[in-house]
Amino acid sequence: PEPANPAVALNAAQAKFAAQKGMQAQDGAQVEQPVVQAMPTVVAAATKHASVPTAQLSSSSRHHRVSHAKKAEHAEDPDDRQYASGSCVPHCYWKCSNPTCDQKCRPKCQQPTCQTRCLKMDYRKCGIECKKPKCTLFCPQDVCQQAPGAGNCTAPQCVTQCSQPHCNMNCVQDMPCESICQKPVCTWDCKEPTECAKPDCQLLCEKPQTCKVVQYPLPGLANGATVESEFKAEPAEYVVGNWSSCSARCGTGQQTRSVKCSMGPEHRCILSDRPASVRTCESTHACGPPCSVRIFGEDNFQGWNVSLSIGKFNKSTLVSRGAFEEDLSSLVVHGRCCRAVLYEHDKFNRGRESHKNGWTASFAEGKHTTADIERAGGKDDDAGSIHVYNDDRCVHEFQLGVTPWYTPTVWIMFVFFGVILLALAICFLCQRQKEEAVEVERGEYESS
């Protein structure tokens, strides 16, 4: 059914509230506070039947509750008297379209049972056709042939032998047959649509229904008083401070700021929306360059592989991520300041007393095979836990824009300048030797 008009329901609620307030006013002013508390309930009930969202109504209802409560607490404040009537309650609600989306459906049927049925056949119209059999003549050996010259010889005793006949019945007529199946039992197999149009919503706000603008003149001047200046009083508003620095040095943190009412008490700024005093922030100040490690189950970066970020990983964590227990044979460290430390036993060689003497092997950026692991002090297929971290000194140099001395680029520069200095030194020595030889020849020439 169509929802009721929110304005009509709201006016009915306000009229009911005004009637209740008038009846309560006859009994005395001391019952005003319970009536104020009942107003949000009446409005909420009317709003429920009018399909007005409760979340949008809560702001105005809260305004009534707070305003009347402030009146009871600060009855001597003339600025709060204008909120005592409770009759001006404009509301806002959403009016949205109702788009429909077709699901992707296809019939899903059970396999029906079928039969082929034929009428009784009339064999009187059928004939028999037989193939020509294969017959041979068989003559046994005669007595006269066994004993030539003997008497009592008769004619040859021969017989005919034929194969088994092959006959078929030939019916030149159509068989009156038909196939009959059950009616299939089918249901719709539907899936939710992947794309669907969003509803088009419009925020509609009512105009105040019973608001009356009341003009309050200034009190008259006392005897001998004069007006020195005239100005407009500004409404109270919130004054915000500057946001603090992010609480996290690397990652997600919080920022805070002060939020105060310009008129002092918080209730004097009730007409203004209070600004947020806390917000989330992202900081990359101390993060340093990216760091990740990929471990492999076989040498030369083959077999199973698992990617690890910064953190400590014991045996159970490695197995849960897809690694085989104590089966690490090679690894790749990504990141200028990234470091990976392999431990022989679980819990970083601290699980048992016998694990304290287990081997450890540390690796910097680059690819490391089984031979590299053994050179660093480890053993193939024998790592129980891993620690991945960013080196603090390297991160500090990274933040300052300083290139570490141990990077390959710096080593190449050192070698390049070293070769140049060595060449200059050799040239200097050669020149010095030539000068000394010239001096010796000159001395010998002068002495001669």
Image (cartoon, rainbow, N blue to C red):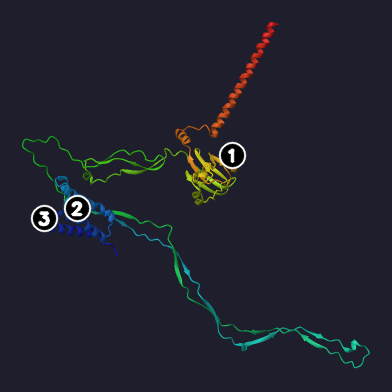
Residue 265's spot in the image, x, y percent?
21, 43
Q: Nearer the viewer, residue 255 or 165?
A: 255
Q: Tell me what residue is drawn at x 48 percent, y 35 percent.
A: 394
The residue where tag 1 is placed is 375
Left or right of residue 97: residue 25: left
Q: Amino acid at mark 3?
A: Gly
Q: Name the secondary structure under disc 3.
A: loop
Which residue in the protein does label 3 denote? 28
Tell whether label 2 touches label 3 (CB within 8 Å). no
Q: Residue beneath label 2, please?
A: 88
Q: Tell me, yes or no, whether the two marked residues, 1 and 3, touch with CB atoms within 8 Å.
A: no
Quadrant of residue 280 in the image?
A: top left
**Separation of disc 3 and disc 2 at Cα?**
23 Å
Q: Is residue 416 left or right of residue 101?
A: right
In primary-sequence order, the first of circles 1 and 3 is 3
Q: Can you give x and y, in whole percent of width and height, for residue 121 in the image?
A: 59, 86
